[in-house]
Image (spheres, grey):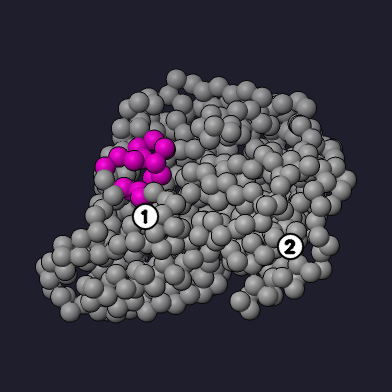
Amino acid sequence: MAAAATMLTAAAAFPTVGLAADGGRPVVVARDMDLNSLDPARAFCDTCQIYLSSVYDRLVDLSSDNKSIVPMLAKEWSANDDATVITFKLDPNAKFSDGSQVEAKDVKWTLERLKNIKGGIAYILDNVKSIETPDAGTVVVTLTAPNSEFVGSLTAPYAGIINSDVVAEHGGDAGEDASTKDTAEQWLLANSAGAGPFVLESYSPSHELRLKRNDNYWGKKPAVGEFIFLQSKDAVSQTQLLESGSADIAMQVDPTTAKNITNENIVVETKPSFNMVYLAISPGAKNLPHALDAKIREAIASAIDYDGIIDLTVDGKATRLAAPIPNGFPGGGVGEPIKYDVEKAKALMQEAGVPDGFTLNATYPNVNQYGVDYTLMMQKIQQDLAEINIKLELAPVEFSVWREKVNGDGIPLTAVFFAPDYYGSSQYAQYFAMMDGTVWYKRAGGKSDPTLANAETPKLLAEALAAPADKSSELFGKLAGVMANDHVILPILSPDAVFASRKGIGGLRFSACCNMVLSDITAE
């Protein structure tokens, strides 16, 4: 409760927030902020999705149906027959927050900077061969191979278009060596340079993030004039802020806490999401007590009581996934989730020559994400794996520490989360699949254990991206099966999204690209 007390003390600096839509008090959002950066090319987190999609408009947007692509900065686009050349026509009304025109040069600079800084989402541009600007209102992107999901991938918040003149003045660089030459990240912690409905007002790490309405916004004026994101670590402290009137929206209230809310001024809604909580095994992590080969990985996967975890952590308000592609996405929902089978797991350990087991480090981020208390979940997994004589040494750490460790020596067994950045299944292959260049191939230790690479994976991905929609979904289903059978990424649950807010707040919805869309929110 010490953490909760700290957050409440911090919140006490604010008066009780009223629900005024225009020029009144701000709407306060309580959440555990996982921000690693405010730079579109470097940020990669759930809070990042909300911030970037509010401040930086993209070429295209994702409709509220979470599938359809709709115009944003680009009023229209077209592709050649094999979808390797895409031409975007910019809306002449589009303007940055300083009033300057959004031009093709800004799009080219932004996308090349994103690709060359090589941040967490840069993989969406891996197959971009060139970006040309025949005139100020036209952008032509040429790909190295057909990619039916490329336009959709540009709905990702990290593809938000930057005012290139402004950011270049403050250290921005889009050249091939931008990863070492670009120095704009620090400036972007205190300033924004986008064409979105909001602008950055201020950011205090581990405390608050403030956004205010962009009065020069070229599109529909958002109803709420200011948002404050207030750092609040857990569901209990977020609920307390909500009940006291110090917050209007709580973003990480779990179903168990939510069902105990009796305050008549609070509205709780539960909606399906595409989010995923998962375990990951690193066969190439340093200093392993025993090789984490295919049999042992399957044993670990079979020894986990998934339904028990769902009941324990989110009161049953979640679904199982058969593979690391969410249900509702192309290829998602194909096959059956792995069964909880302790006897099978013990037999696999015997076959692997380690019936007496071993000890594994399990460092994980100390978070409450999507309503899941990670320490509670990991304690349950620790109990499950003890049944097959695998002892987990649990080590909860801050997210920044976890990120450094998992990207360094690796973590033998860890747990983390993933939210989609756009509607499309290629992002799951490009992030999770065991093939050269993906984030988790590196984290799993692919360089030290190249046997992890699955030759079938890149071939299936290329075929899926080149195929028509009906065939593409079938191919993504096959790819999902391959990824599941690797037993490196183990989906634990896809939790329902819980929206808890004070009466008078409207427009809350889950977005498959942007988490929560601030410009949709209203306040009476």
Look at the image and tell me whether residue 191 can be seen: no
| Residue found at x 81% / y 52% | 18
Q: Is residue 327 magenta?
A: yes
Q: Residue furthest top?
A: 81
In the rendered structure, find residue 155 and report the number of the disc placed on it.
none
Residue 350 locus on image (x, y percent): 12, 71
Sort mark 1 into few (<14), some (14-19) or many (20+) by Cα contacts within 10 Å.
many
Disc 2 target residue: 244
Q: Quadrant of the C terminus?
A: top right
Residue 316: x and y, percent?
A: 41, 54
Residue 305 relative to residue 233: left or right: left
Q: Is residue 435 left or right of residue 427?
A: left
Give, as a single range, the part of the protein colored magenta. Answer: 320-335
Q: In this view of the protein, which residue sits in the foreground, 263 or 376?
A: 263
Q: Mark yes or no: residue 353 visible.
A: yes
Image quadrant in which the N terminus is located: bottom right
Is 246 contained in the magenta span? no
Check disc 1 and give the amino acid type: Pro
- Mark 2 vs mark 1, CA separation in Å: 36 Å
Under tag 2, what secondary structure?
helix
Please tell me which residue lies in front, 237 or 402. Answer: 237
Q: Which mark is residue 491?
A: 1
